[in-house]
């Protein structure tokens, strides 16, 4: 690789940035801050406008983690402090906040991160397969029994 004055300048600039400038926002979840888990099943046909949602057998599942009051406030503060990023998804340019959800330090990755939701109702992560949503529930808090619903239900 041939070095140019510009590549040297870019290297110097990158070294001048604090490590936090390169860090991805991260939010840990566990039995300590999750108060309830709901898995909601949706028919994918209602989500096909726009970038669409991946599915298996015509359905996808939103995995909803309700948080305690303190963690909800922390999540909202983190969401508001996390800049929007533009990514390409299914041929669309989407803007989202790239927050990594972790369980015991390991990432909890949804089937379509651009559809992740972080709000006062908790964290909602979409999964193509019900089994993956159930596995996420077991990872987050094995002592909580997930509630199931058809469509939106945030009770």
Image (tube, rainbow, N blue to C red):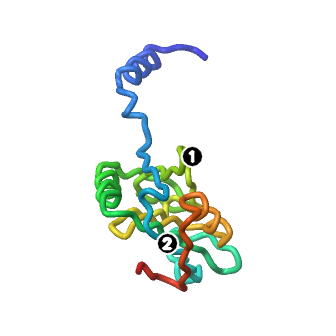
Q: Position of residue 20 (x, y in %)?
A: 37, 33
Where disc 1 sits, the SS reads strand
Q: Position of residue 102 (x, y in %)?
A: 51, 50
Mark nearer the N terminus (2 vs 1): 2
Q: Which mark is residue 106?
A: 1
Q: Please tell me in which quadrant of the rendered image residue 16 appears.
A: top left
Q: Position of residue 53 (x, y in %)?
A: 57, 71
- 74 above or below 131? above
Count of numbered circles in the view: 2
Considering every residue shown, the one lying at the far bottom of the view is: 150
Where disc 2 sits, the SS reads loop
- 30 above or below 12? below
Distance, label 2 to label 1, CA atoms, is 31 Å
The residue under the point 56% across, 54% down is 108
Considering every residue shown, the one lying at the far right of the view is: 57
Work out whether residue 35 or residue 88 is closer to the camera in this orientation and state it: 35
The residue under the point 56% across, 65% down is 143
Q: Which mark is residue 35?
A: none
Q: Position of residue 117 (x, y in %)?
A: 43, 64
- 62 above or below 92? below
* Mark 2 surroundings: few (<14), some (14-19) or many (≥20) residues within 10 A: few
Q: Residue 50 carries which label?
A: 2
Position of the C terminus, as image quadrant, is bottom left
The residue under the point 61% across, 17% down is 1
């Amino acid at each position: 690789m041939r070095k140019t004055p510009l590549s040297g300048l870019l290297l110097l600039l990158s070294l001048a940035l604090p490590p936090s400038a390169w860090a991805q926002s991260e939010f840990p979840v566990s039995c300590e801050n999750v108060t309830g888990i709901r898995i909601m099943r949706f028919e994918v046909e209602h989500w096909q406008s726009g970038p669409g949602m991946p599915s298996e057998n015509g359905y996808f599942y939103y995995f909803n983690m309700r948080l305690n009051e303190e963690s909800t406030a922390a999540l909202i503060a983190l969401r508001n402090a996390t800049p929007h990023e533009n990514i390409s998804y299914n041929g669309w340019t989407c803007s989202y906040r790239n927050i990594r959800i972790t369980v015991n330090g390991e990432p909890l990755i949804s089937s379509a991160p651009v559809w992740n939701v972080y709000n006062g109702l908790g964290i909602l992560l979409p999964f193509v397969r019900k089994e993956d949503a159930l596995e996420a529930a077991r990872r987050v808090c094995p002592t909580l029994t997930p509630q199931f619903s058809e469509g939106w239900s945030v009770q």
